[in-house]
Amino acid sequence: MLKANHRPQNSHVRVGILCLILFLSVVAYADRSILSISGSAIKDEFGLSAIQLGLILSAFSWAYVIGQIPGGLFLDRFGTKKVYGVTLALWSISTLLMGFVGEFSSGMTMALTLMFALRFALGLIEAPSFPANARAVIMWFPSAERGRASSLFASAQYFAVAIFSPLSGWLVSRFGWEWPFFVLGGIGVLAVFVWMGFMRSPRQHPQVSENELRYIEQGGALVDIDSAQTLKARPPLSKAMFRKLLSNRMLWCAYIGQYCIIALSYFFITWFPIYLVQARGMNILDAGFATIAPAVFGFLGGISGGYISDKLLASGWSLSWARKTPYIVGMLMAASLVLAAVIPSNVGIIAMMSFAFFGKGVAAGAGTWTIVSDTAPKEAVGLAGAIFNGIGNMAGFITPLLFGIIVGLTGSYSIGLVFVGAHCVVAALLFLLVMGPIERVGAEQNPAASYENPEKARGIKAV
């Protein structure tokens, strides 16, 4: 541990930590999405059918869900810095290797096998990334700032689309389908050195001042969860902890709330463009541009949700209602997407979807990863985030499938829109009527052992 007289007088190291995990989250999202940019050229080069390409595209989602629980256990056993660093290196190598598939495959079958294996590996290895982000936020941010911090890394998907999709498209058109994998894989490898060089637990970071350390610790940050002593002293994870995480009513509302948020995300990136083309008569180019506005508004909503939630907390609202209220209002706003079925103009549909995705962003910024940071047991932060993220990401393959079945059986996109909108209403009602108080799991039985004190944090001057 660093002595006080060796620390700077003032610092904002937590801002640098947040910028770093935001950057890594953007890289992670870009790595998982660039196949859609290169997919057409890959399909042509190797003679893949649409079904075979779809199989490769689905490999990530299945592996990502499967890897959540093991990833969370590794985080709780070995700590954020080590697990994130190792997995970042491995998933970047997996991305790089995708660009060499043509060099190591002698035919379509071999290429299909290698690409499926590498995408499956990418999903499995990337699984701990967002639970690790949540763990870093818990470690570095007081309760009064967690909404904003969590909303930023949760909005990484929008940064990834805005930055890397155009870059990847240019690389494919200029140099070939392999180059997005080379570039992003190389960025990830370089990022490993930045992560390992800058990331520390708060007490061990040489650039953290006593003022900043005191502020985040007294505000509820779990500053010691990654210390060597804590990791070494942590008892083996018990079945009782699994039962606690899988039987808690409040947590299940959070899990389902995350599922509903991700259901909206996957509807947007899978069926929404198809709906615009097949049901609204847009051409493919216009449909692609039409997705920009909802994505931008989704990002703005995400930032707004975290800011509003933290402001409510700072102004005296309880932790429960400071997190719940923006989520409930945001999801009810998002439910308005069902009106697309009766809006006659395409401009009106884009405006309505932008409003709906602003609401979805508000809900995600205030009430998903932020709640995990507020409620996860100190001894199982990684596992709690993994269960939350695993259940939520099941929507990644369930929602597109069920939407397709509904449209196929009924011939109506309108009924499909009602199905998606119902997720919003169900989630809002769960948070309003079923969830109950938001509190650290374990602390509700022993208030004296609570790991954070938001009320106390409000009385500490931010640094």
Image (cartoon, grey):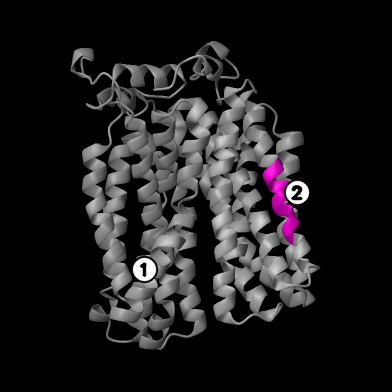
Residue 435 covered by magenta stretch: no
Q: Is residue 286 visible?
A: yes
**x then y, percent, for residue 20:** 33, 43
Judging by the rendered image, the residue that carries numbered circle 1 is: 167
Residue 335 covered by magenta stretch: yes
Q: Residue at x 66, y 65 (%)?
A: 350
Q: Which residues are magenta?
A: 329-337
**Based on the displayed image, in which of its 4 quarters is residue 125 positioned?**
bottom left
Q: How many discs appear?
A: 2
Residue 136, compared with residue 356, is above or below; it is: above
**x then y, percent, for residue 89:** 26, 53
**Based on the displayed image, in which of its 4 quarters is residue 131 positioned?**
top left
Judging by the rendered image, the residue that carries numbered circle 2 is: 425
Between 133 and 460, the one lying in front of the other is: 460
Q: Would you call the spot at circle 1 few (<14 residues within 10 Å), some (14-19), or many (20 or more)?
A: some
**x then y, percent, for residue 406:** 73, 70
Between 254 and 390, the one lying in front of the other is: 254
Does dot 2 land on a helix, a strand or a loop?
A: helix
**Based on the displayed image, in which of its 4 quarters is residue 422 positioned?**
bottom right
Between 348 and 242, the one lying in front of the other is: 348
Q: Residue furthest left?
A: 6
**x then y, percent, for residue 433:** 77, 35
Q: Residue at x 57, y 80 (%)?
A: 284
Name the amino acid type tagged 1: Leu
Q: Residue furthest right?
A: 342
Q: Is residue 418 visible?
A: no
**Marks 2/1: CA–CA distance:** 37 Å
Q: Residue at x 65, y 40 (%)?
A: 327
Of tags 2 and 1, which is closer to the observer?
Answer: 1
Main secondary structure found in the magenta portion: helix
Does dot 1 land on a helix, a strand or a loop?
A: helix
